[in-house]
Image (spheres, rainbow, N blue to C red):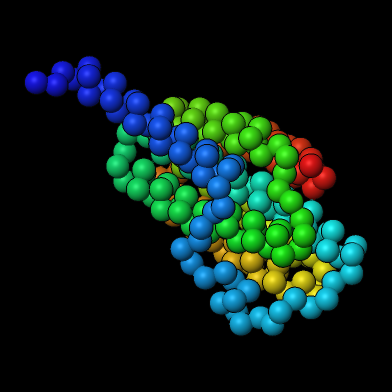
Amino acid sequence: MTSTASVRVLDGVDQVFAVLDTALRTLAADAKSSRPYPPQASSLPADIPLSDDQKRLSAALMRVNHVGEVCAQALYASQSLGTNSAAVKAQLDQAAREETDHLAWTEQRLQELGGRTSVLNPVWFAGAFAIGLVAARVSDAVSLGFVVETERQVEQHLRSHLSRLPAADLRSRAIVDQMAADEVAHGAAAQSAGAQELPWAVRGLMRLAGKVMTSTAHYL
């Protein structure tokens, strides 16, 4: 008969392999989307010619958005690992699948623009994973509150990109617009599941960390 301790060890090993799988798929593999690519879903024409400066700006902004999705994969993986609630885990896993779409879309758009992903993606992933795990270990309510605040800040960040992207870059705009709508839905779902509002100091630190990340990823 298998002992309880043995089962726990096996569960722990499975969790470690699941995290490693998420990290490898996020950092080393081409992301696969389960939903149509927004520019195609919107029946947008082929790229309207952009100047070199416009392409560089769009690529930089989409690189920042791709970094955000790398962090989202890490956050949701760590929070799913840290919860003991099957309902919370199912909700986090569903959101992570939709964030995988975002990862694939931003990656594809970067390729179309001749851009590249951030060289610091492993650092972003590791940092986000650690933060998400800490939040999950405190309580489900705090973990869900972290989701709400994260998605709120990401949605604001995406909306700001819509004002900065070149007007002619309709393909990037379609992607960012759909991503923003999804982030609002993720935050609303976490809120309805019992999220606890985070202290203002924590929200401020999250905003500061996000600014450091986005400013760095714009260039690196």
**146 vs 58: above or below:** above
Residue 44 seen by the camera = yes
The percent position of residue 114, horizontal first and vertical second, equals 77, 60
The percent position of residue 150, horizontal first and vertical second, equals 59, 45
**176 vs 200: above or below:** below
Quadrant in the picture for residue 72: top right
| Front residue of this view, candidates 108 and 61 | 108
Quadrant occupied by the C terminus: top right
Residue at the spot 72% in from the left edge and 44% down from the top edge: 118
**129 vs 25: above or below:** above
Residue at the spot 70% in from the left edge and 60% down from the top edge: 111
The percent position of residue 99, horizontal first and vertical second, equals 52, 54
Q: Is residue 81 left or right of residue 120?
A: left
Q: Is residue 171 left or right of residue 15?
A: right
The percent position of residue 122, horizontal first and vertical second, equals 63, 35
Residue 164 seen by the camera = no
Quadrant occupied by the N terminus: top left
Q: Is residue 170 left or right of residue 106?
A: right
Quadrant in the picture for residue 120: top right
| Front residue of this view, candidates 196 and 125 | 125
**178 vs 90: above or below:** below
Residue at the spot 45% in from the left edge and 39% down from the top edge: 21
Number of labels in the image equals 0
Quadrant in the picture for residue 198: top right
Residue at the spot 59% in from the left edge and 76% down from the top edge: 40
